[in-house]
């Protein structure tokens, strides 16, 4: 099922709940307001809202009117029906209920919600040779620059989609990440190799506003190109990894993990890596970066050392 279809189903469920469940519409409005004021994304709000609509339609009452025993039985059924080990649907239902209680000023004990233990998984990290192979598997300069930014700057998928031409400062060799995760700006160093490639890409592909344009929007007469779709970027990364002969499960975030790990291996201290990743807490960086050699250096891009190490082979 496509993302668009899922969104449509979610909107229909919320609409039904507003029409059929007394008190749901007012509760949903308070929930939306709370999530917005706390800076949660629209995607997260829609996902949690869908789960609240489902449980409200199931009982014909809002979760705030349920007994803890009813919620426990409902969650038990979800857990038994789960088809995947991660129990994603079950966990997201619990998270939605948690946030609802928080927005209403109630404790988790109000509905006796279970604790969800965070899974500790080590990230998949590519070797420099594998990154090099991905770069050389690109058939277009656009794709090579996409991989170059994801690896060379450690960008998240949404961040690379949001890069505009005005965010590139070739004179100062800096990329301005505008309103990344957590509504935070940051500056990142641009490799000389990446700057040369970006200049060539811009001169040949002629992007207008976004660095990476998607397909023209037919509703606008074809004159306005949209941002690259997140699914398209994920698909490109997976295809390039496959073409490069990499057996690992590679996603966009794999290149971000690899960016951070290679910086540490090249001697950059973990505090600088934390800032470059845009993490709020250093513990988040430490979760998947286990070896941080204490060698304070000026911030740099791992693309520089990649070329030094691999181009001579």
Image (cartoon, grey):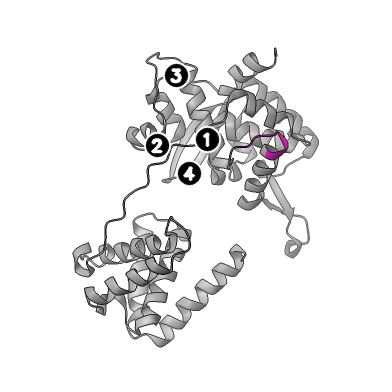
Residue 81: x %, y % from top left: 43, 69
Q: Residue at x 56, y 72 (%)?
A: 8
Reading the image, the residue beneath label 2 is 279
Q: Nearer the viewer, residue 68 or 175?
A: 68
Q: Which residue is drawn at 39% across and 68% down?
A: 80
Reading the image, the residue beneath label 1 is 256
Secondary structure beneath disc 2? loop
In terms of secondary structure, what is the magenta stretch mainly?
Answer: loop
Secondary structure beneath disc 4? strand
Q: Which of 96 and 82 is in front in this view?
A: 82
Q: Is residue 172 left or right of residue 19?
A: right
* Gap in angstroms between the C-alphas marked 4 and 2: 13 Å
Between discs 4 and 2, the one toward the N terminus: 4
The numbered dot on residue 268 is: 3
Q: Mark yes or no: residue 194 visible.
A: yes
* Gap in angstroms between the C-alphas marked 2 and 1: 12 Å
Q: Is residue 91 left or right of residue 308?
A: left
Q: Residue at x 42, y 59 (%)?
A: 87
**Compared with residue 110, is residue 128 higher up or lower down, i.e. above or below?**
above
Q: Quadrant of the N terminus?
A: bottom right
* Gap in angstroms between the C-alphas marked 2 and 3: 16 Å
Residue 66: x %, y % from top left: 26, 78
> Pointer 2 and pointer 1: residues touching (CB < 8 Å)?
no
């Amino acid at each position: 099922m496509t993302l668009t279809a899922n969104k449509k189903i979610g909107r229909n469920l919320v609409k039904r709940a507003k029409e059929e469940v007394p008190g749901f519409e007012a509760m949903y409005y308070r929930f939306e307001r709370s999530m917005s004021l706390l800076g949660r994304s629209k995607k997260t709000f829609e996902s949690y809202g869908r789960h609240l609509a489902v449980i409200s339609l199931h009982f014909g009452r809002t979760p705030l009117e349920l007994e803890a025993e009813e919620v426990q039985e409902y969650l038990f059924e979800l857990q038994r029906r789960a088809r995947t080990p991660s129990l994603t649907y079950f966990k997201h239902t619990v998270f939605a209920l948690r946030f609802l209680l928080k927005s209403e000023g109630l404790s988790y004990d109000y509905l006796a919600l279970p604790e969800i233990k965070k899974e500790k998984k080590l990230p998949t990290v590519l070797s420099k040779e594998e990154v090099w192979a991905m770069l050389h598997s690109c058939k277009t300069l656009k794709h090579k620059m996409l991989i170059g930014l994801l690896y060379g700057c450690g960008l998240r998928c949404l961040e690379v989609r949001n890069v505009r031409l005005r965010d590139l400062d070739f004179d100062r060799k800096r990329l301005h990440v505008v309103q990344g995760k957590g509504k935070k700006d940051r500056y990142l160093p641009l490799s000389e190799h990446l700057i040369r490639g970006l200049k060539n890409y811009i001169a040949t592909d002629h992007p207008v506003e976004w660095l990476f344009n998607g397909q023209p929007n037919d509703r606008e007469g074809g004159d306005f190109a949209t941002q690259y779709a997140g699914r398209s970027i994920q698909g490109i990364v997976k295809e390039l990894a496959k073409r490069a002969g990499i057996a690992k499960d590679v996603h966009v975030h794999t290149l971000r993990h690899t960016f951070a790990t290679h910086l540490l291996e090249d001697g950059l201290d973990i505090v600088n890596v934390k800032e470059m990743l845009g993490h709020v807490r250093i513990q988040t960086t430490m979760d998947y970066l286990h070896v941080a050699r204490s060698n304070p250096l000026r911030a740099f891009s791992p693309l520089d050392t990649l070329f030094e190490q691999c181009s001579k082979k």
